[in-house]
Image (tube, rainbow, N blue to C red):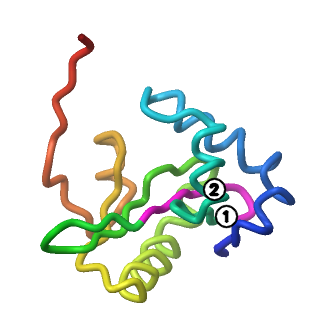
Amino acid sequence: MKFVPFWDVAACWDEVSPWLQKALDKQTAYDLPSVLVEIMAARMHLWKTDNAAFVTQIQNFPRERIAVIFLCGGEGLDGWANEANAVFGNYAKAHGCSALCIVGRHGWTKAAPGFVDTDTVFRRKI
């Protein structure tokens, strides 16, 4: 798994964008162009493996800093779950974060060893 600096994103965007789009299809807050804008502005970070892509973000709160795995898409979860856990844990520590969180569906509890489902978001359209 490797971090993709914003200046190298264009070289792999055609490869990773279909993987990210599948994750984006399950939510309504972001679309692919808006994620690309955030990555290019270095407010979000792109990571990739041979068959998956991740988008992370550092979120600052009054009492703590949290690294968030915001998007993940691709194939072969069994092949990169443990590596991702280690890589993103180091990423969080290097950025002075007190926690690493995944924003996603409940299915992540099976795929993310060591993570605990701590919060539920209730949502309705208005």
The answer to whether residue 16 is left or right of residue 113 is: right
> Which residues lie in the magenta part?
49-57
Secondary structure under the numbered disc 1 in the rendered image: strand
Residue 50 falls within the magenta-colored stretch: yes
Q: Amino acid at mark 2?
A: Ala
Q: Residue at x 71, y 56 (%)?
A: 51
Place of residue 121 in the rendered image (x, y in percent of width and height, measured from the top left)? 19, 37
Q: Are marks 2 and 1 in contact (CB under 8 Å)?
A: yes
Q: Amino acid at mark 1?
A: Lys
| 27 shown above or below 63 | above
Residue 4 falls within the magenta-colored stretch: no
Place of residue 122 in the rendered image (x, y in percent of width and height, measured from the top left)? 16, 29
Near-viewer residue (51 or 54): 54
Q: Residue at x 51, y 61 (%)?
A: 43
The answer to whether residue 70 is left or right of residue 83 is: left
Q: Residue at x 43, y 73 (%)?
A: 85
Q: Quadrant of residue 116?
A: bottom left
Dot 2, how many residues are within 10 Å of its Cα: few (below 14), some (14-19), or many (20+)? many
Question: Magenta stretch: dominant SS?
Answer: strand
Residue located beneath label 2 in the image? 53
Place of residue 94 in the rendered image (x, y in percent of width and height, measured from the top left)? 42, 88
| 24 shown above or below 49 | above
Secondary structure under the numbered disc 2 in the rendered image: strand
What quarter of the picture does the C terminus occupy? top left
Q: Quadrant of residue 124?
A: top left
Which of pointers 2 and 1 lies earlier in the amino acid sequence? 1
Residue located beneath label 1 in the image? 48
